[in-house]
Image: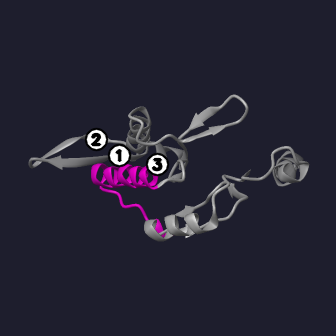
Amino acid sequence: MKSCLASASVSIPVNGSSSEEVIPQKSLNMLLVRAKELGLIRGASIGAGGVNVSHLQFAYDIILFCKADWVEVTNVKRVLRCFEVVSGLKINYHKSDVSGVGIDEAIVDEFASRLNCTIHKLPFKYLGLPLGANPRRNQSWKPVVDMFRSKLAG
């Protein structure tokens, strides 16, 4: 399975000739990093140290972080469109969700509507970890601890 995910690549025809192979996961990462460098997307500051994150990616699952304004959301959509053109892959917006942190629900509704996405309220799980839950509450980590206990018990 790991080999299949790590070895996926595509080749894009340019002027009738195939280009060098591109690894889609890496090309999306590169597009997002470049957009951040150019100030097109700002990402989100996380934690006391203010670590700035624009995206988290594992295989074909990705979480994008951006400011809740139309310019930045539009720029995220443009980066995703560039990825579709470069990779030949298609983003399924109907399987995508929009979540807001400290944002008025009406604005989140409007973003979701214009992006053809659904709304996902916080907290939710990403790769088994709680996102948007209070990290200081033991209850937030109980499912993770329970999962580790069950794995270690075996």
Classify 22 as above or below 110. above
Q: CA–CA distance between discs 2 and 1?
A: 6 Å
Residue in view at x 48 percent, y 48 percent: 5
Compared across the picture, whether 123 is left or right of 64 comes to right
Span shown in magenta: 70-94
* Pointers 2 and 1 in contact (C-beta within 8 Å): yes
Read off the residue under disc 2: 21
Quadrant of residue 116 within the rendered picture:
bottom left
- Return the x and y of residue 112 as percentages of the image width and height: 51, 67
Q: Which amino acid type is marked by label 1?
A: Ser
Quadrant of residue 23 within the rendered picture:
top left
Q: Nearer the viewer, residue 30 or 132?
A: 132
* Pointers 3 and 1 in contact (C-beta within 8 Å): no
Compared across the picture, whether 23 is left or right of 112 comes to left
Read off the residue under disc 3: 4
Element type at marker 3?
helix
Q: Which amino acid type is marked by label 2?
A: Glu
Residue in view at x 42 percent, y 51 percent: 71
Residue in view at x 42 percent, y 43 percent: 7
Q: Nearer the viewer, mark 3 or mark 2?
A: 2
Q: CA–CA distance between discs 3 and 2?
A: 15 Å
Query: Is tag 3's residue or tag 1's residue first in the polypeptide sequence?
Result: 3
Q: Nearer the viewer, mark 3 or mark 1?
A: 1
Read off the residue under disc 1: 9
Query: Is tag 3's residue or tag 2's residue first in the polypeptide sequence?
Result: 3
Q: Which amino acid type is marked by label 3?
A: Cys
